[in-house]
Image (tube, helix red, strand yellow):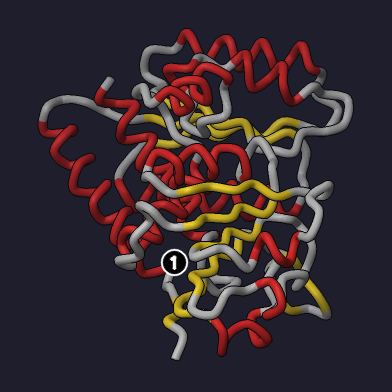
């Protein structure tokens, strides 16, 4: 029977560990503050931002909230980011994505100081990850590594296939699996014979952005499947993987919801704690 990897439980473990570390840091006279910036009132973004604020409150760090109107200009946003870069009492800066169409996300990401880039999106953070130097790790891929490790899934030497090559998940995911000595293949929209490539995977990471696309025809018997996707169909949540269809073919799988999602915020909290130690 397939094992369901419980992201809620593992994320709670990480947040509890962070909470203990924050208490120690406070005893040493160190405070931690995360600045969260949201432009516009996208409903999904608002939910994510509120969940991040709740996580901050739980582990004992301060959060500053900047809720800016949709019509905020790029110059105004960049000015705020620079102000937060200079504030010594702010350890981490998070600008919630996506941003309105008139704002260049890349410019905003690059404006955040790498020392405060707790999302792990800055080119300096990505470069450090690429060559194995210390730096903030992209939260979702880092969370997936923790899901695997804390579920006793061996990565070293295993065939790992990542479906998706986004800057936020696919590319950093491949790098982190390589860091753990996995043998990694990255697939994307131009990959030929995708099913055959996916069926080689001992560990399959689905981050393709298409609801329930990955069925049992993509799955090697006994594989571990991590579903990064999150979609809403007919009022219900689903992922990139057809959960019911693959369940009898896998050894372990993450559900949607309750799998990868909670880990992203847990690893953001981990980055925030690390920011106070630097």
Q: Is residue 269 above or below residue 276?
A: below
- For the N terminus, which image quadrant? bottom left
Secondary structure found at label 1: helix
Residue in the foreground of this view, choosing between 142 and 214: 214
- Whether residue 58 is visible, yes or no, is yes
Give the number of callouts: 1
Name which residue lies at 55% across and 63% down: 201
The percent position of residue 36, horizontal first and vertical second, equals: 55, 34
- Whether residue 237 is visible, yes or no, is no
- Viewed as shown, does residue 86 lie left or right of 241? left
The percent position of residue 75, horizontal first and vertical second, equals: 77, 11
Q: Is residue 213 above or below residue 159?
A: below
Name which residue lies at 48% across and 48% down: 183
Quarter occupied by residue 172: top right
Quarter occupied by residue 34: top left
Residue in the foreground of this view, choosing between 256 and 22: 256
Residue in the foreground of this view, choosing between 89 and 44: 44
Name which residue lies at 74% across and 25% down: 105
The percent position of residue 35, horizontal first and vertical second, equals: 50, 29
């Amino acid at each position: 029977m397939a094992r369901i990897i419980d992201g809620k439980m593992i994320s709670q473990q990480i947040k509890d560990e962070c909470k203990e570390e924050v208490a120690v840091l406070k005893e040493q006279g160190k405070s931690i503050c995360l600045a969260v910036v949201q432009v516009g009132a996208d409903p999904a973004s608002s939910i994510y931002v509120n969940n991040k604020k709740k996580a901050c409150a739980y582990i004992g760090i301060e959060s500053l909230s900047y809720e800016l109107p949709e019509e905020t200009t790029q110059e105004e946003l960049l000015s705020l980011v620079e102000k937060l870069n200079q504030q010594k009492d702010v350890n981490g800066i998070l600008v919630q994505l996506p941003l309105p169409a008139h704002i260049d996300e890349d410019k905003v990401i690059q404006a955040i100081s790498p020392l405060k880039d707790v999302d792990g999106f800055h080119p300096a953070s990505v470069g450090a990850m690429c060559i194995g130097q210390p730096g903030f790790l992209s939260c979702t891929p880092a969370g997936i590594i923790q899901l695997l490790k804390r579920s006793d899934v061996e990565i070293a030497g295993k065939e790992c296939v990542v479906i998706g090559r986004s800057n936020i998940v696919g590319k950093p995911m491949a790098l982190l699996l390589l860091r753990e000595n996995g043998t990694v293949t990255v697939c994307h929209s131009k990959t030929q014979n995708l099913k055959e490539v996916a069926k080689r995977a001992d560990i399959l990471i689905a981050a393709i952005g298409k609801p329930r696309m990955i069925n049992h025809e993509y799955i090697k018997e006994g594989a571990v499947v991590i579903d990064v996707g999150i979609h809403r169909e007919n009022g219900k949540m689903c992922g990139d993987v057809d959960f019911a269809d693959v369940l009898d073919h896998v050894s372990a799988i993450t559900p949607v919801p309750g799998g990868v999602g909670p880990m992203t915020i847990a690893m953001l909290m981990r980055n925030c704690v690390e920011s106070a130690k630097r």
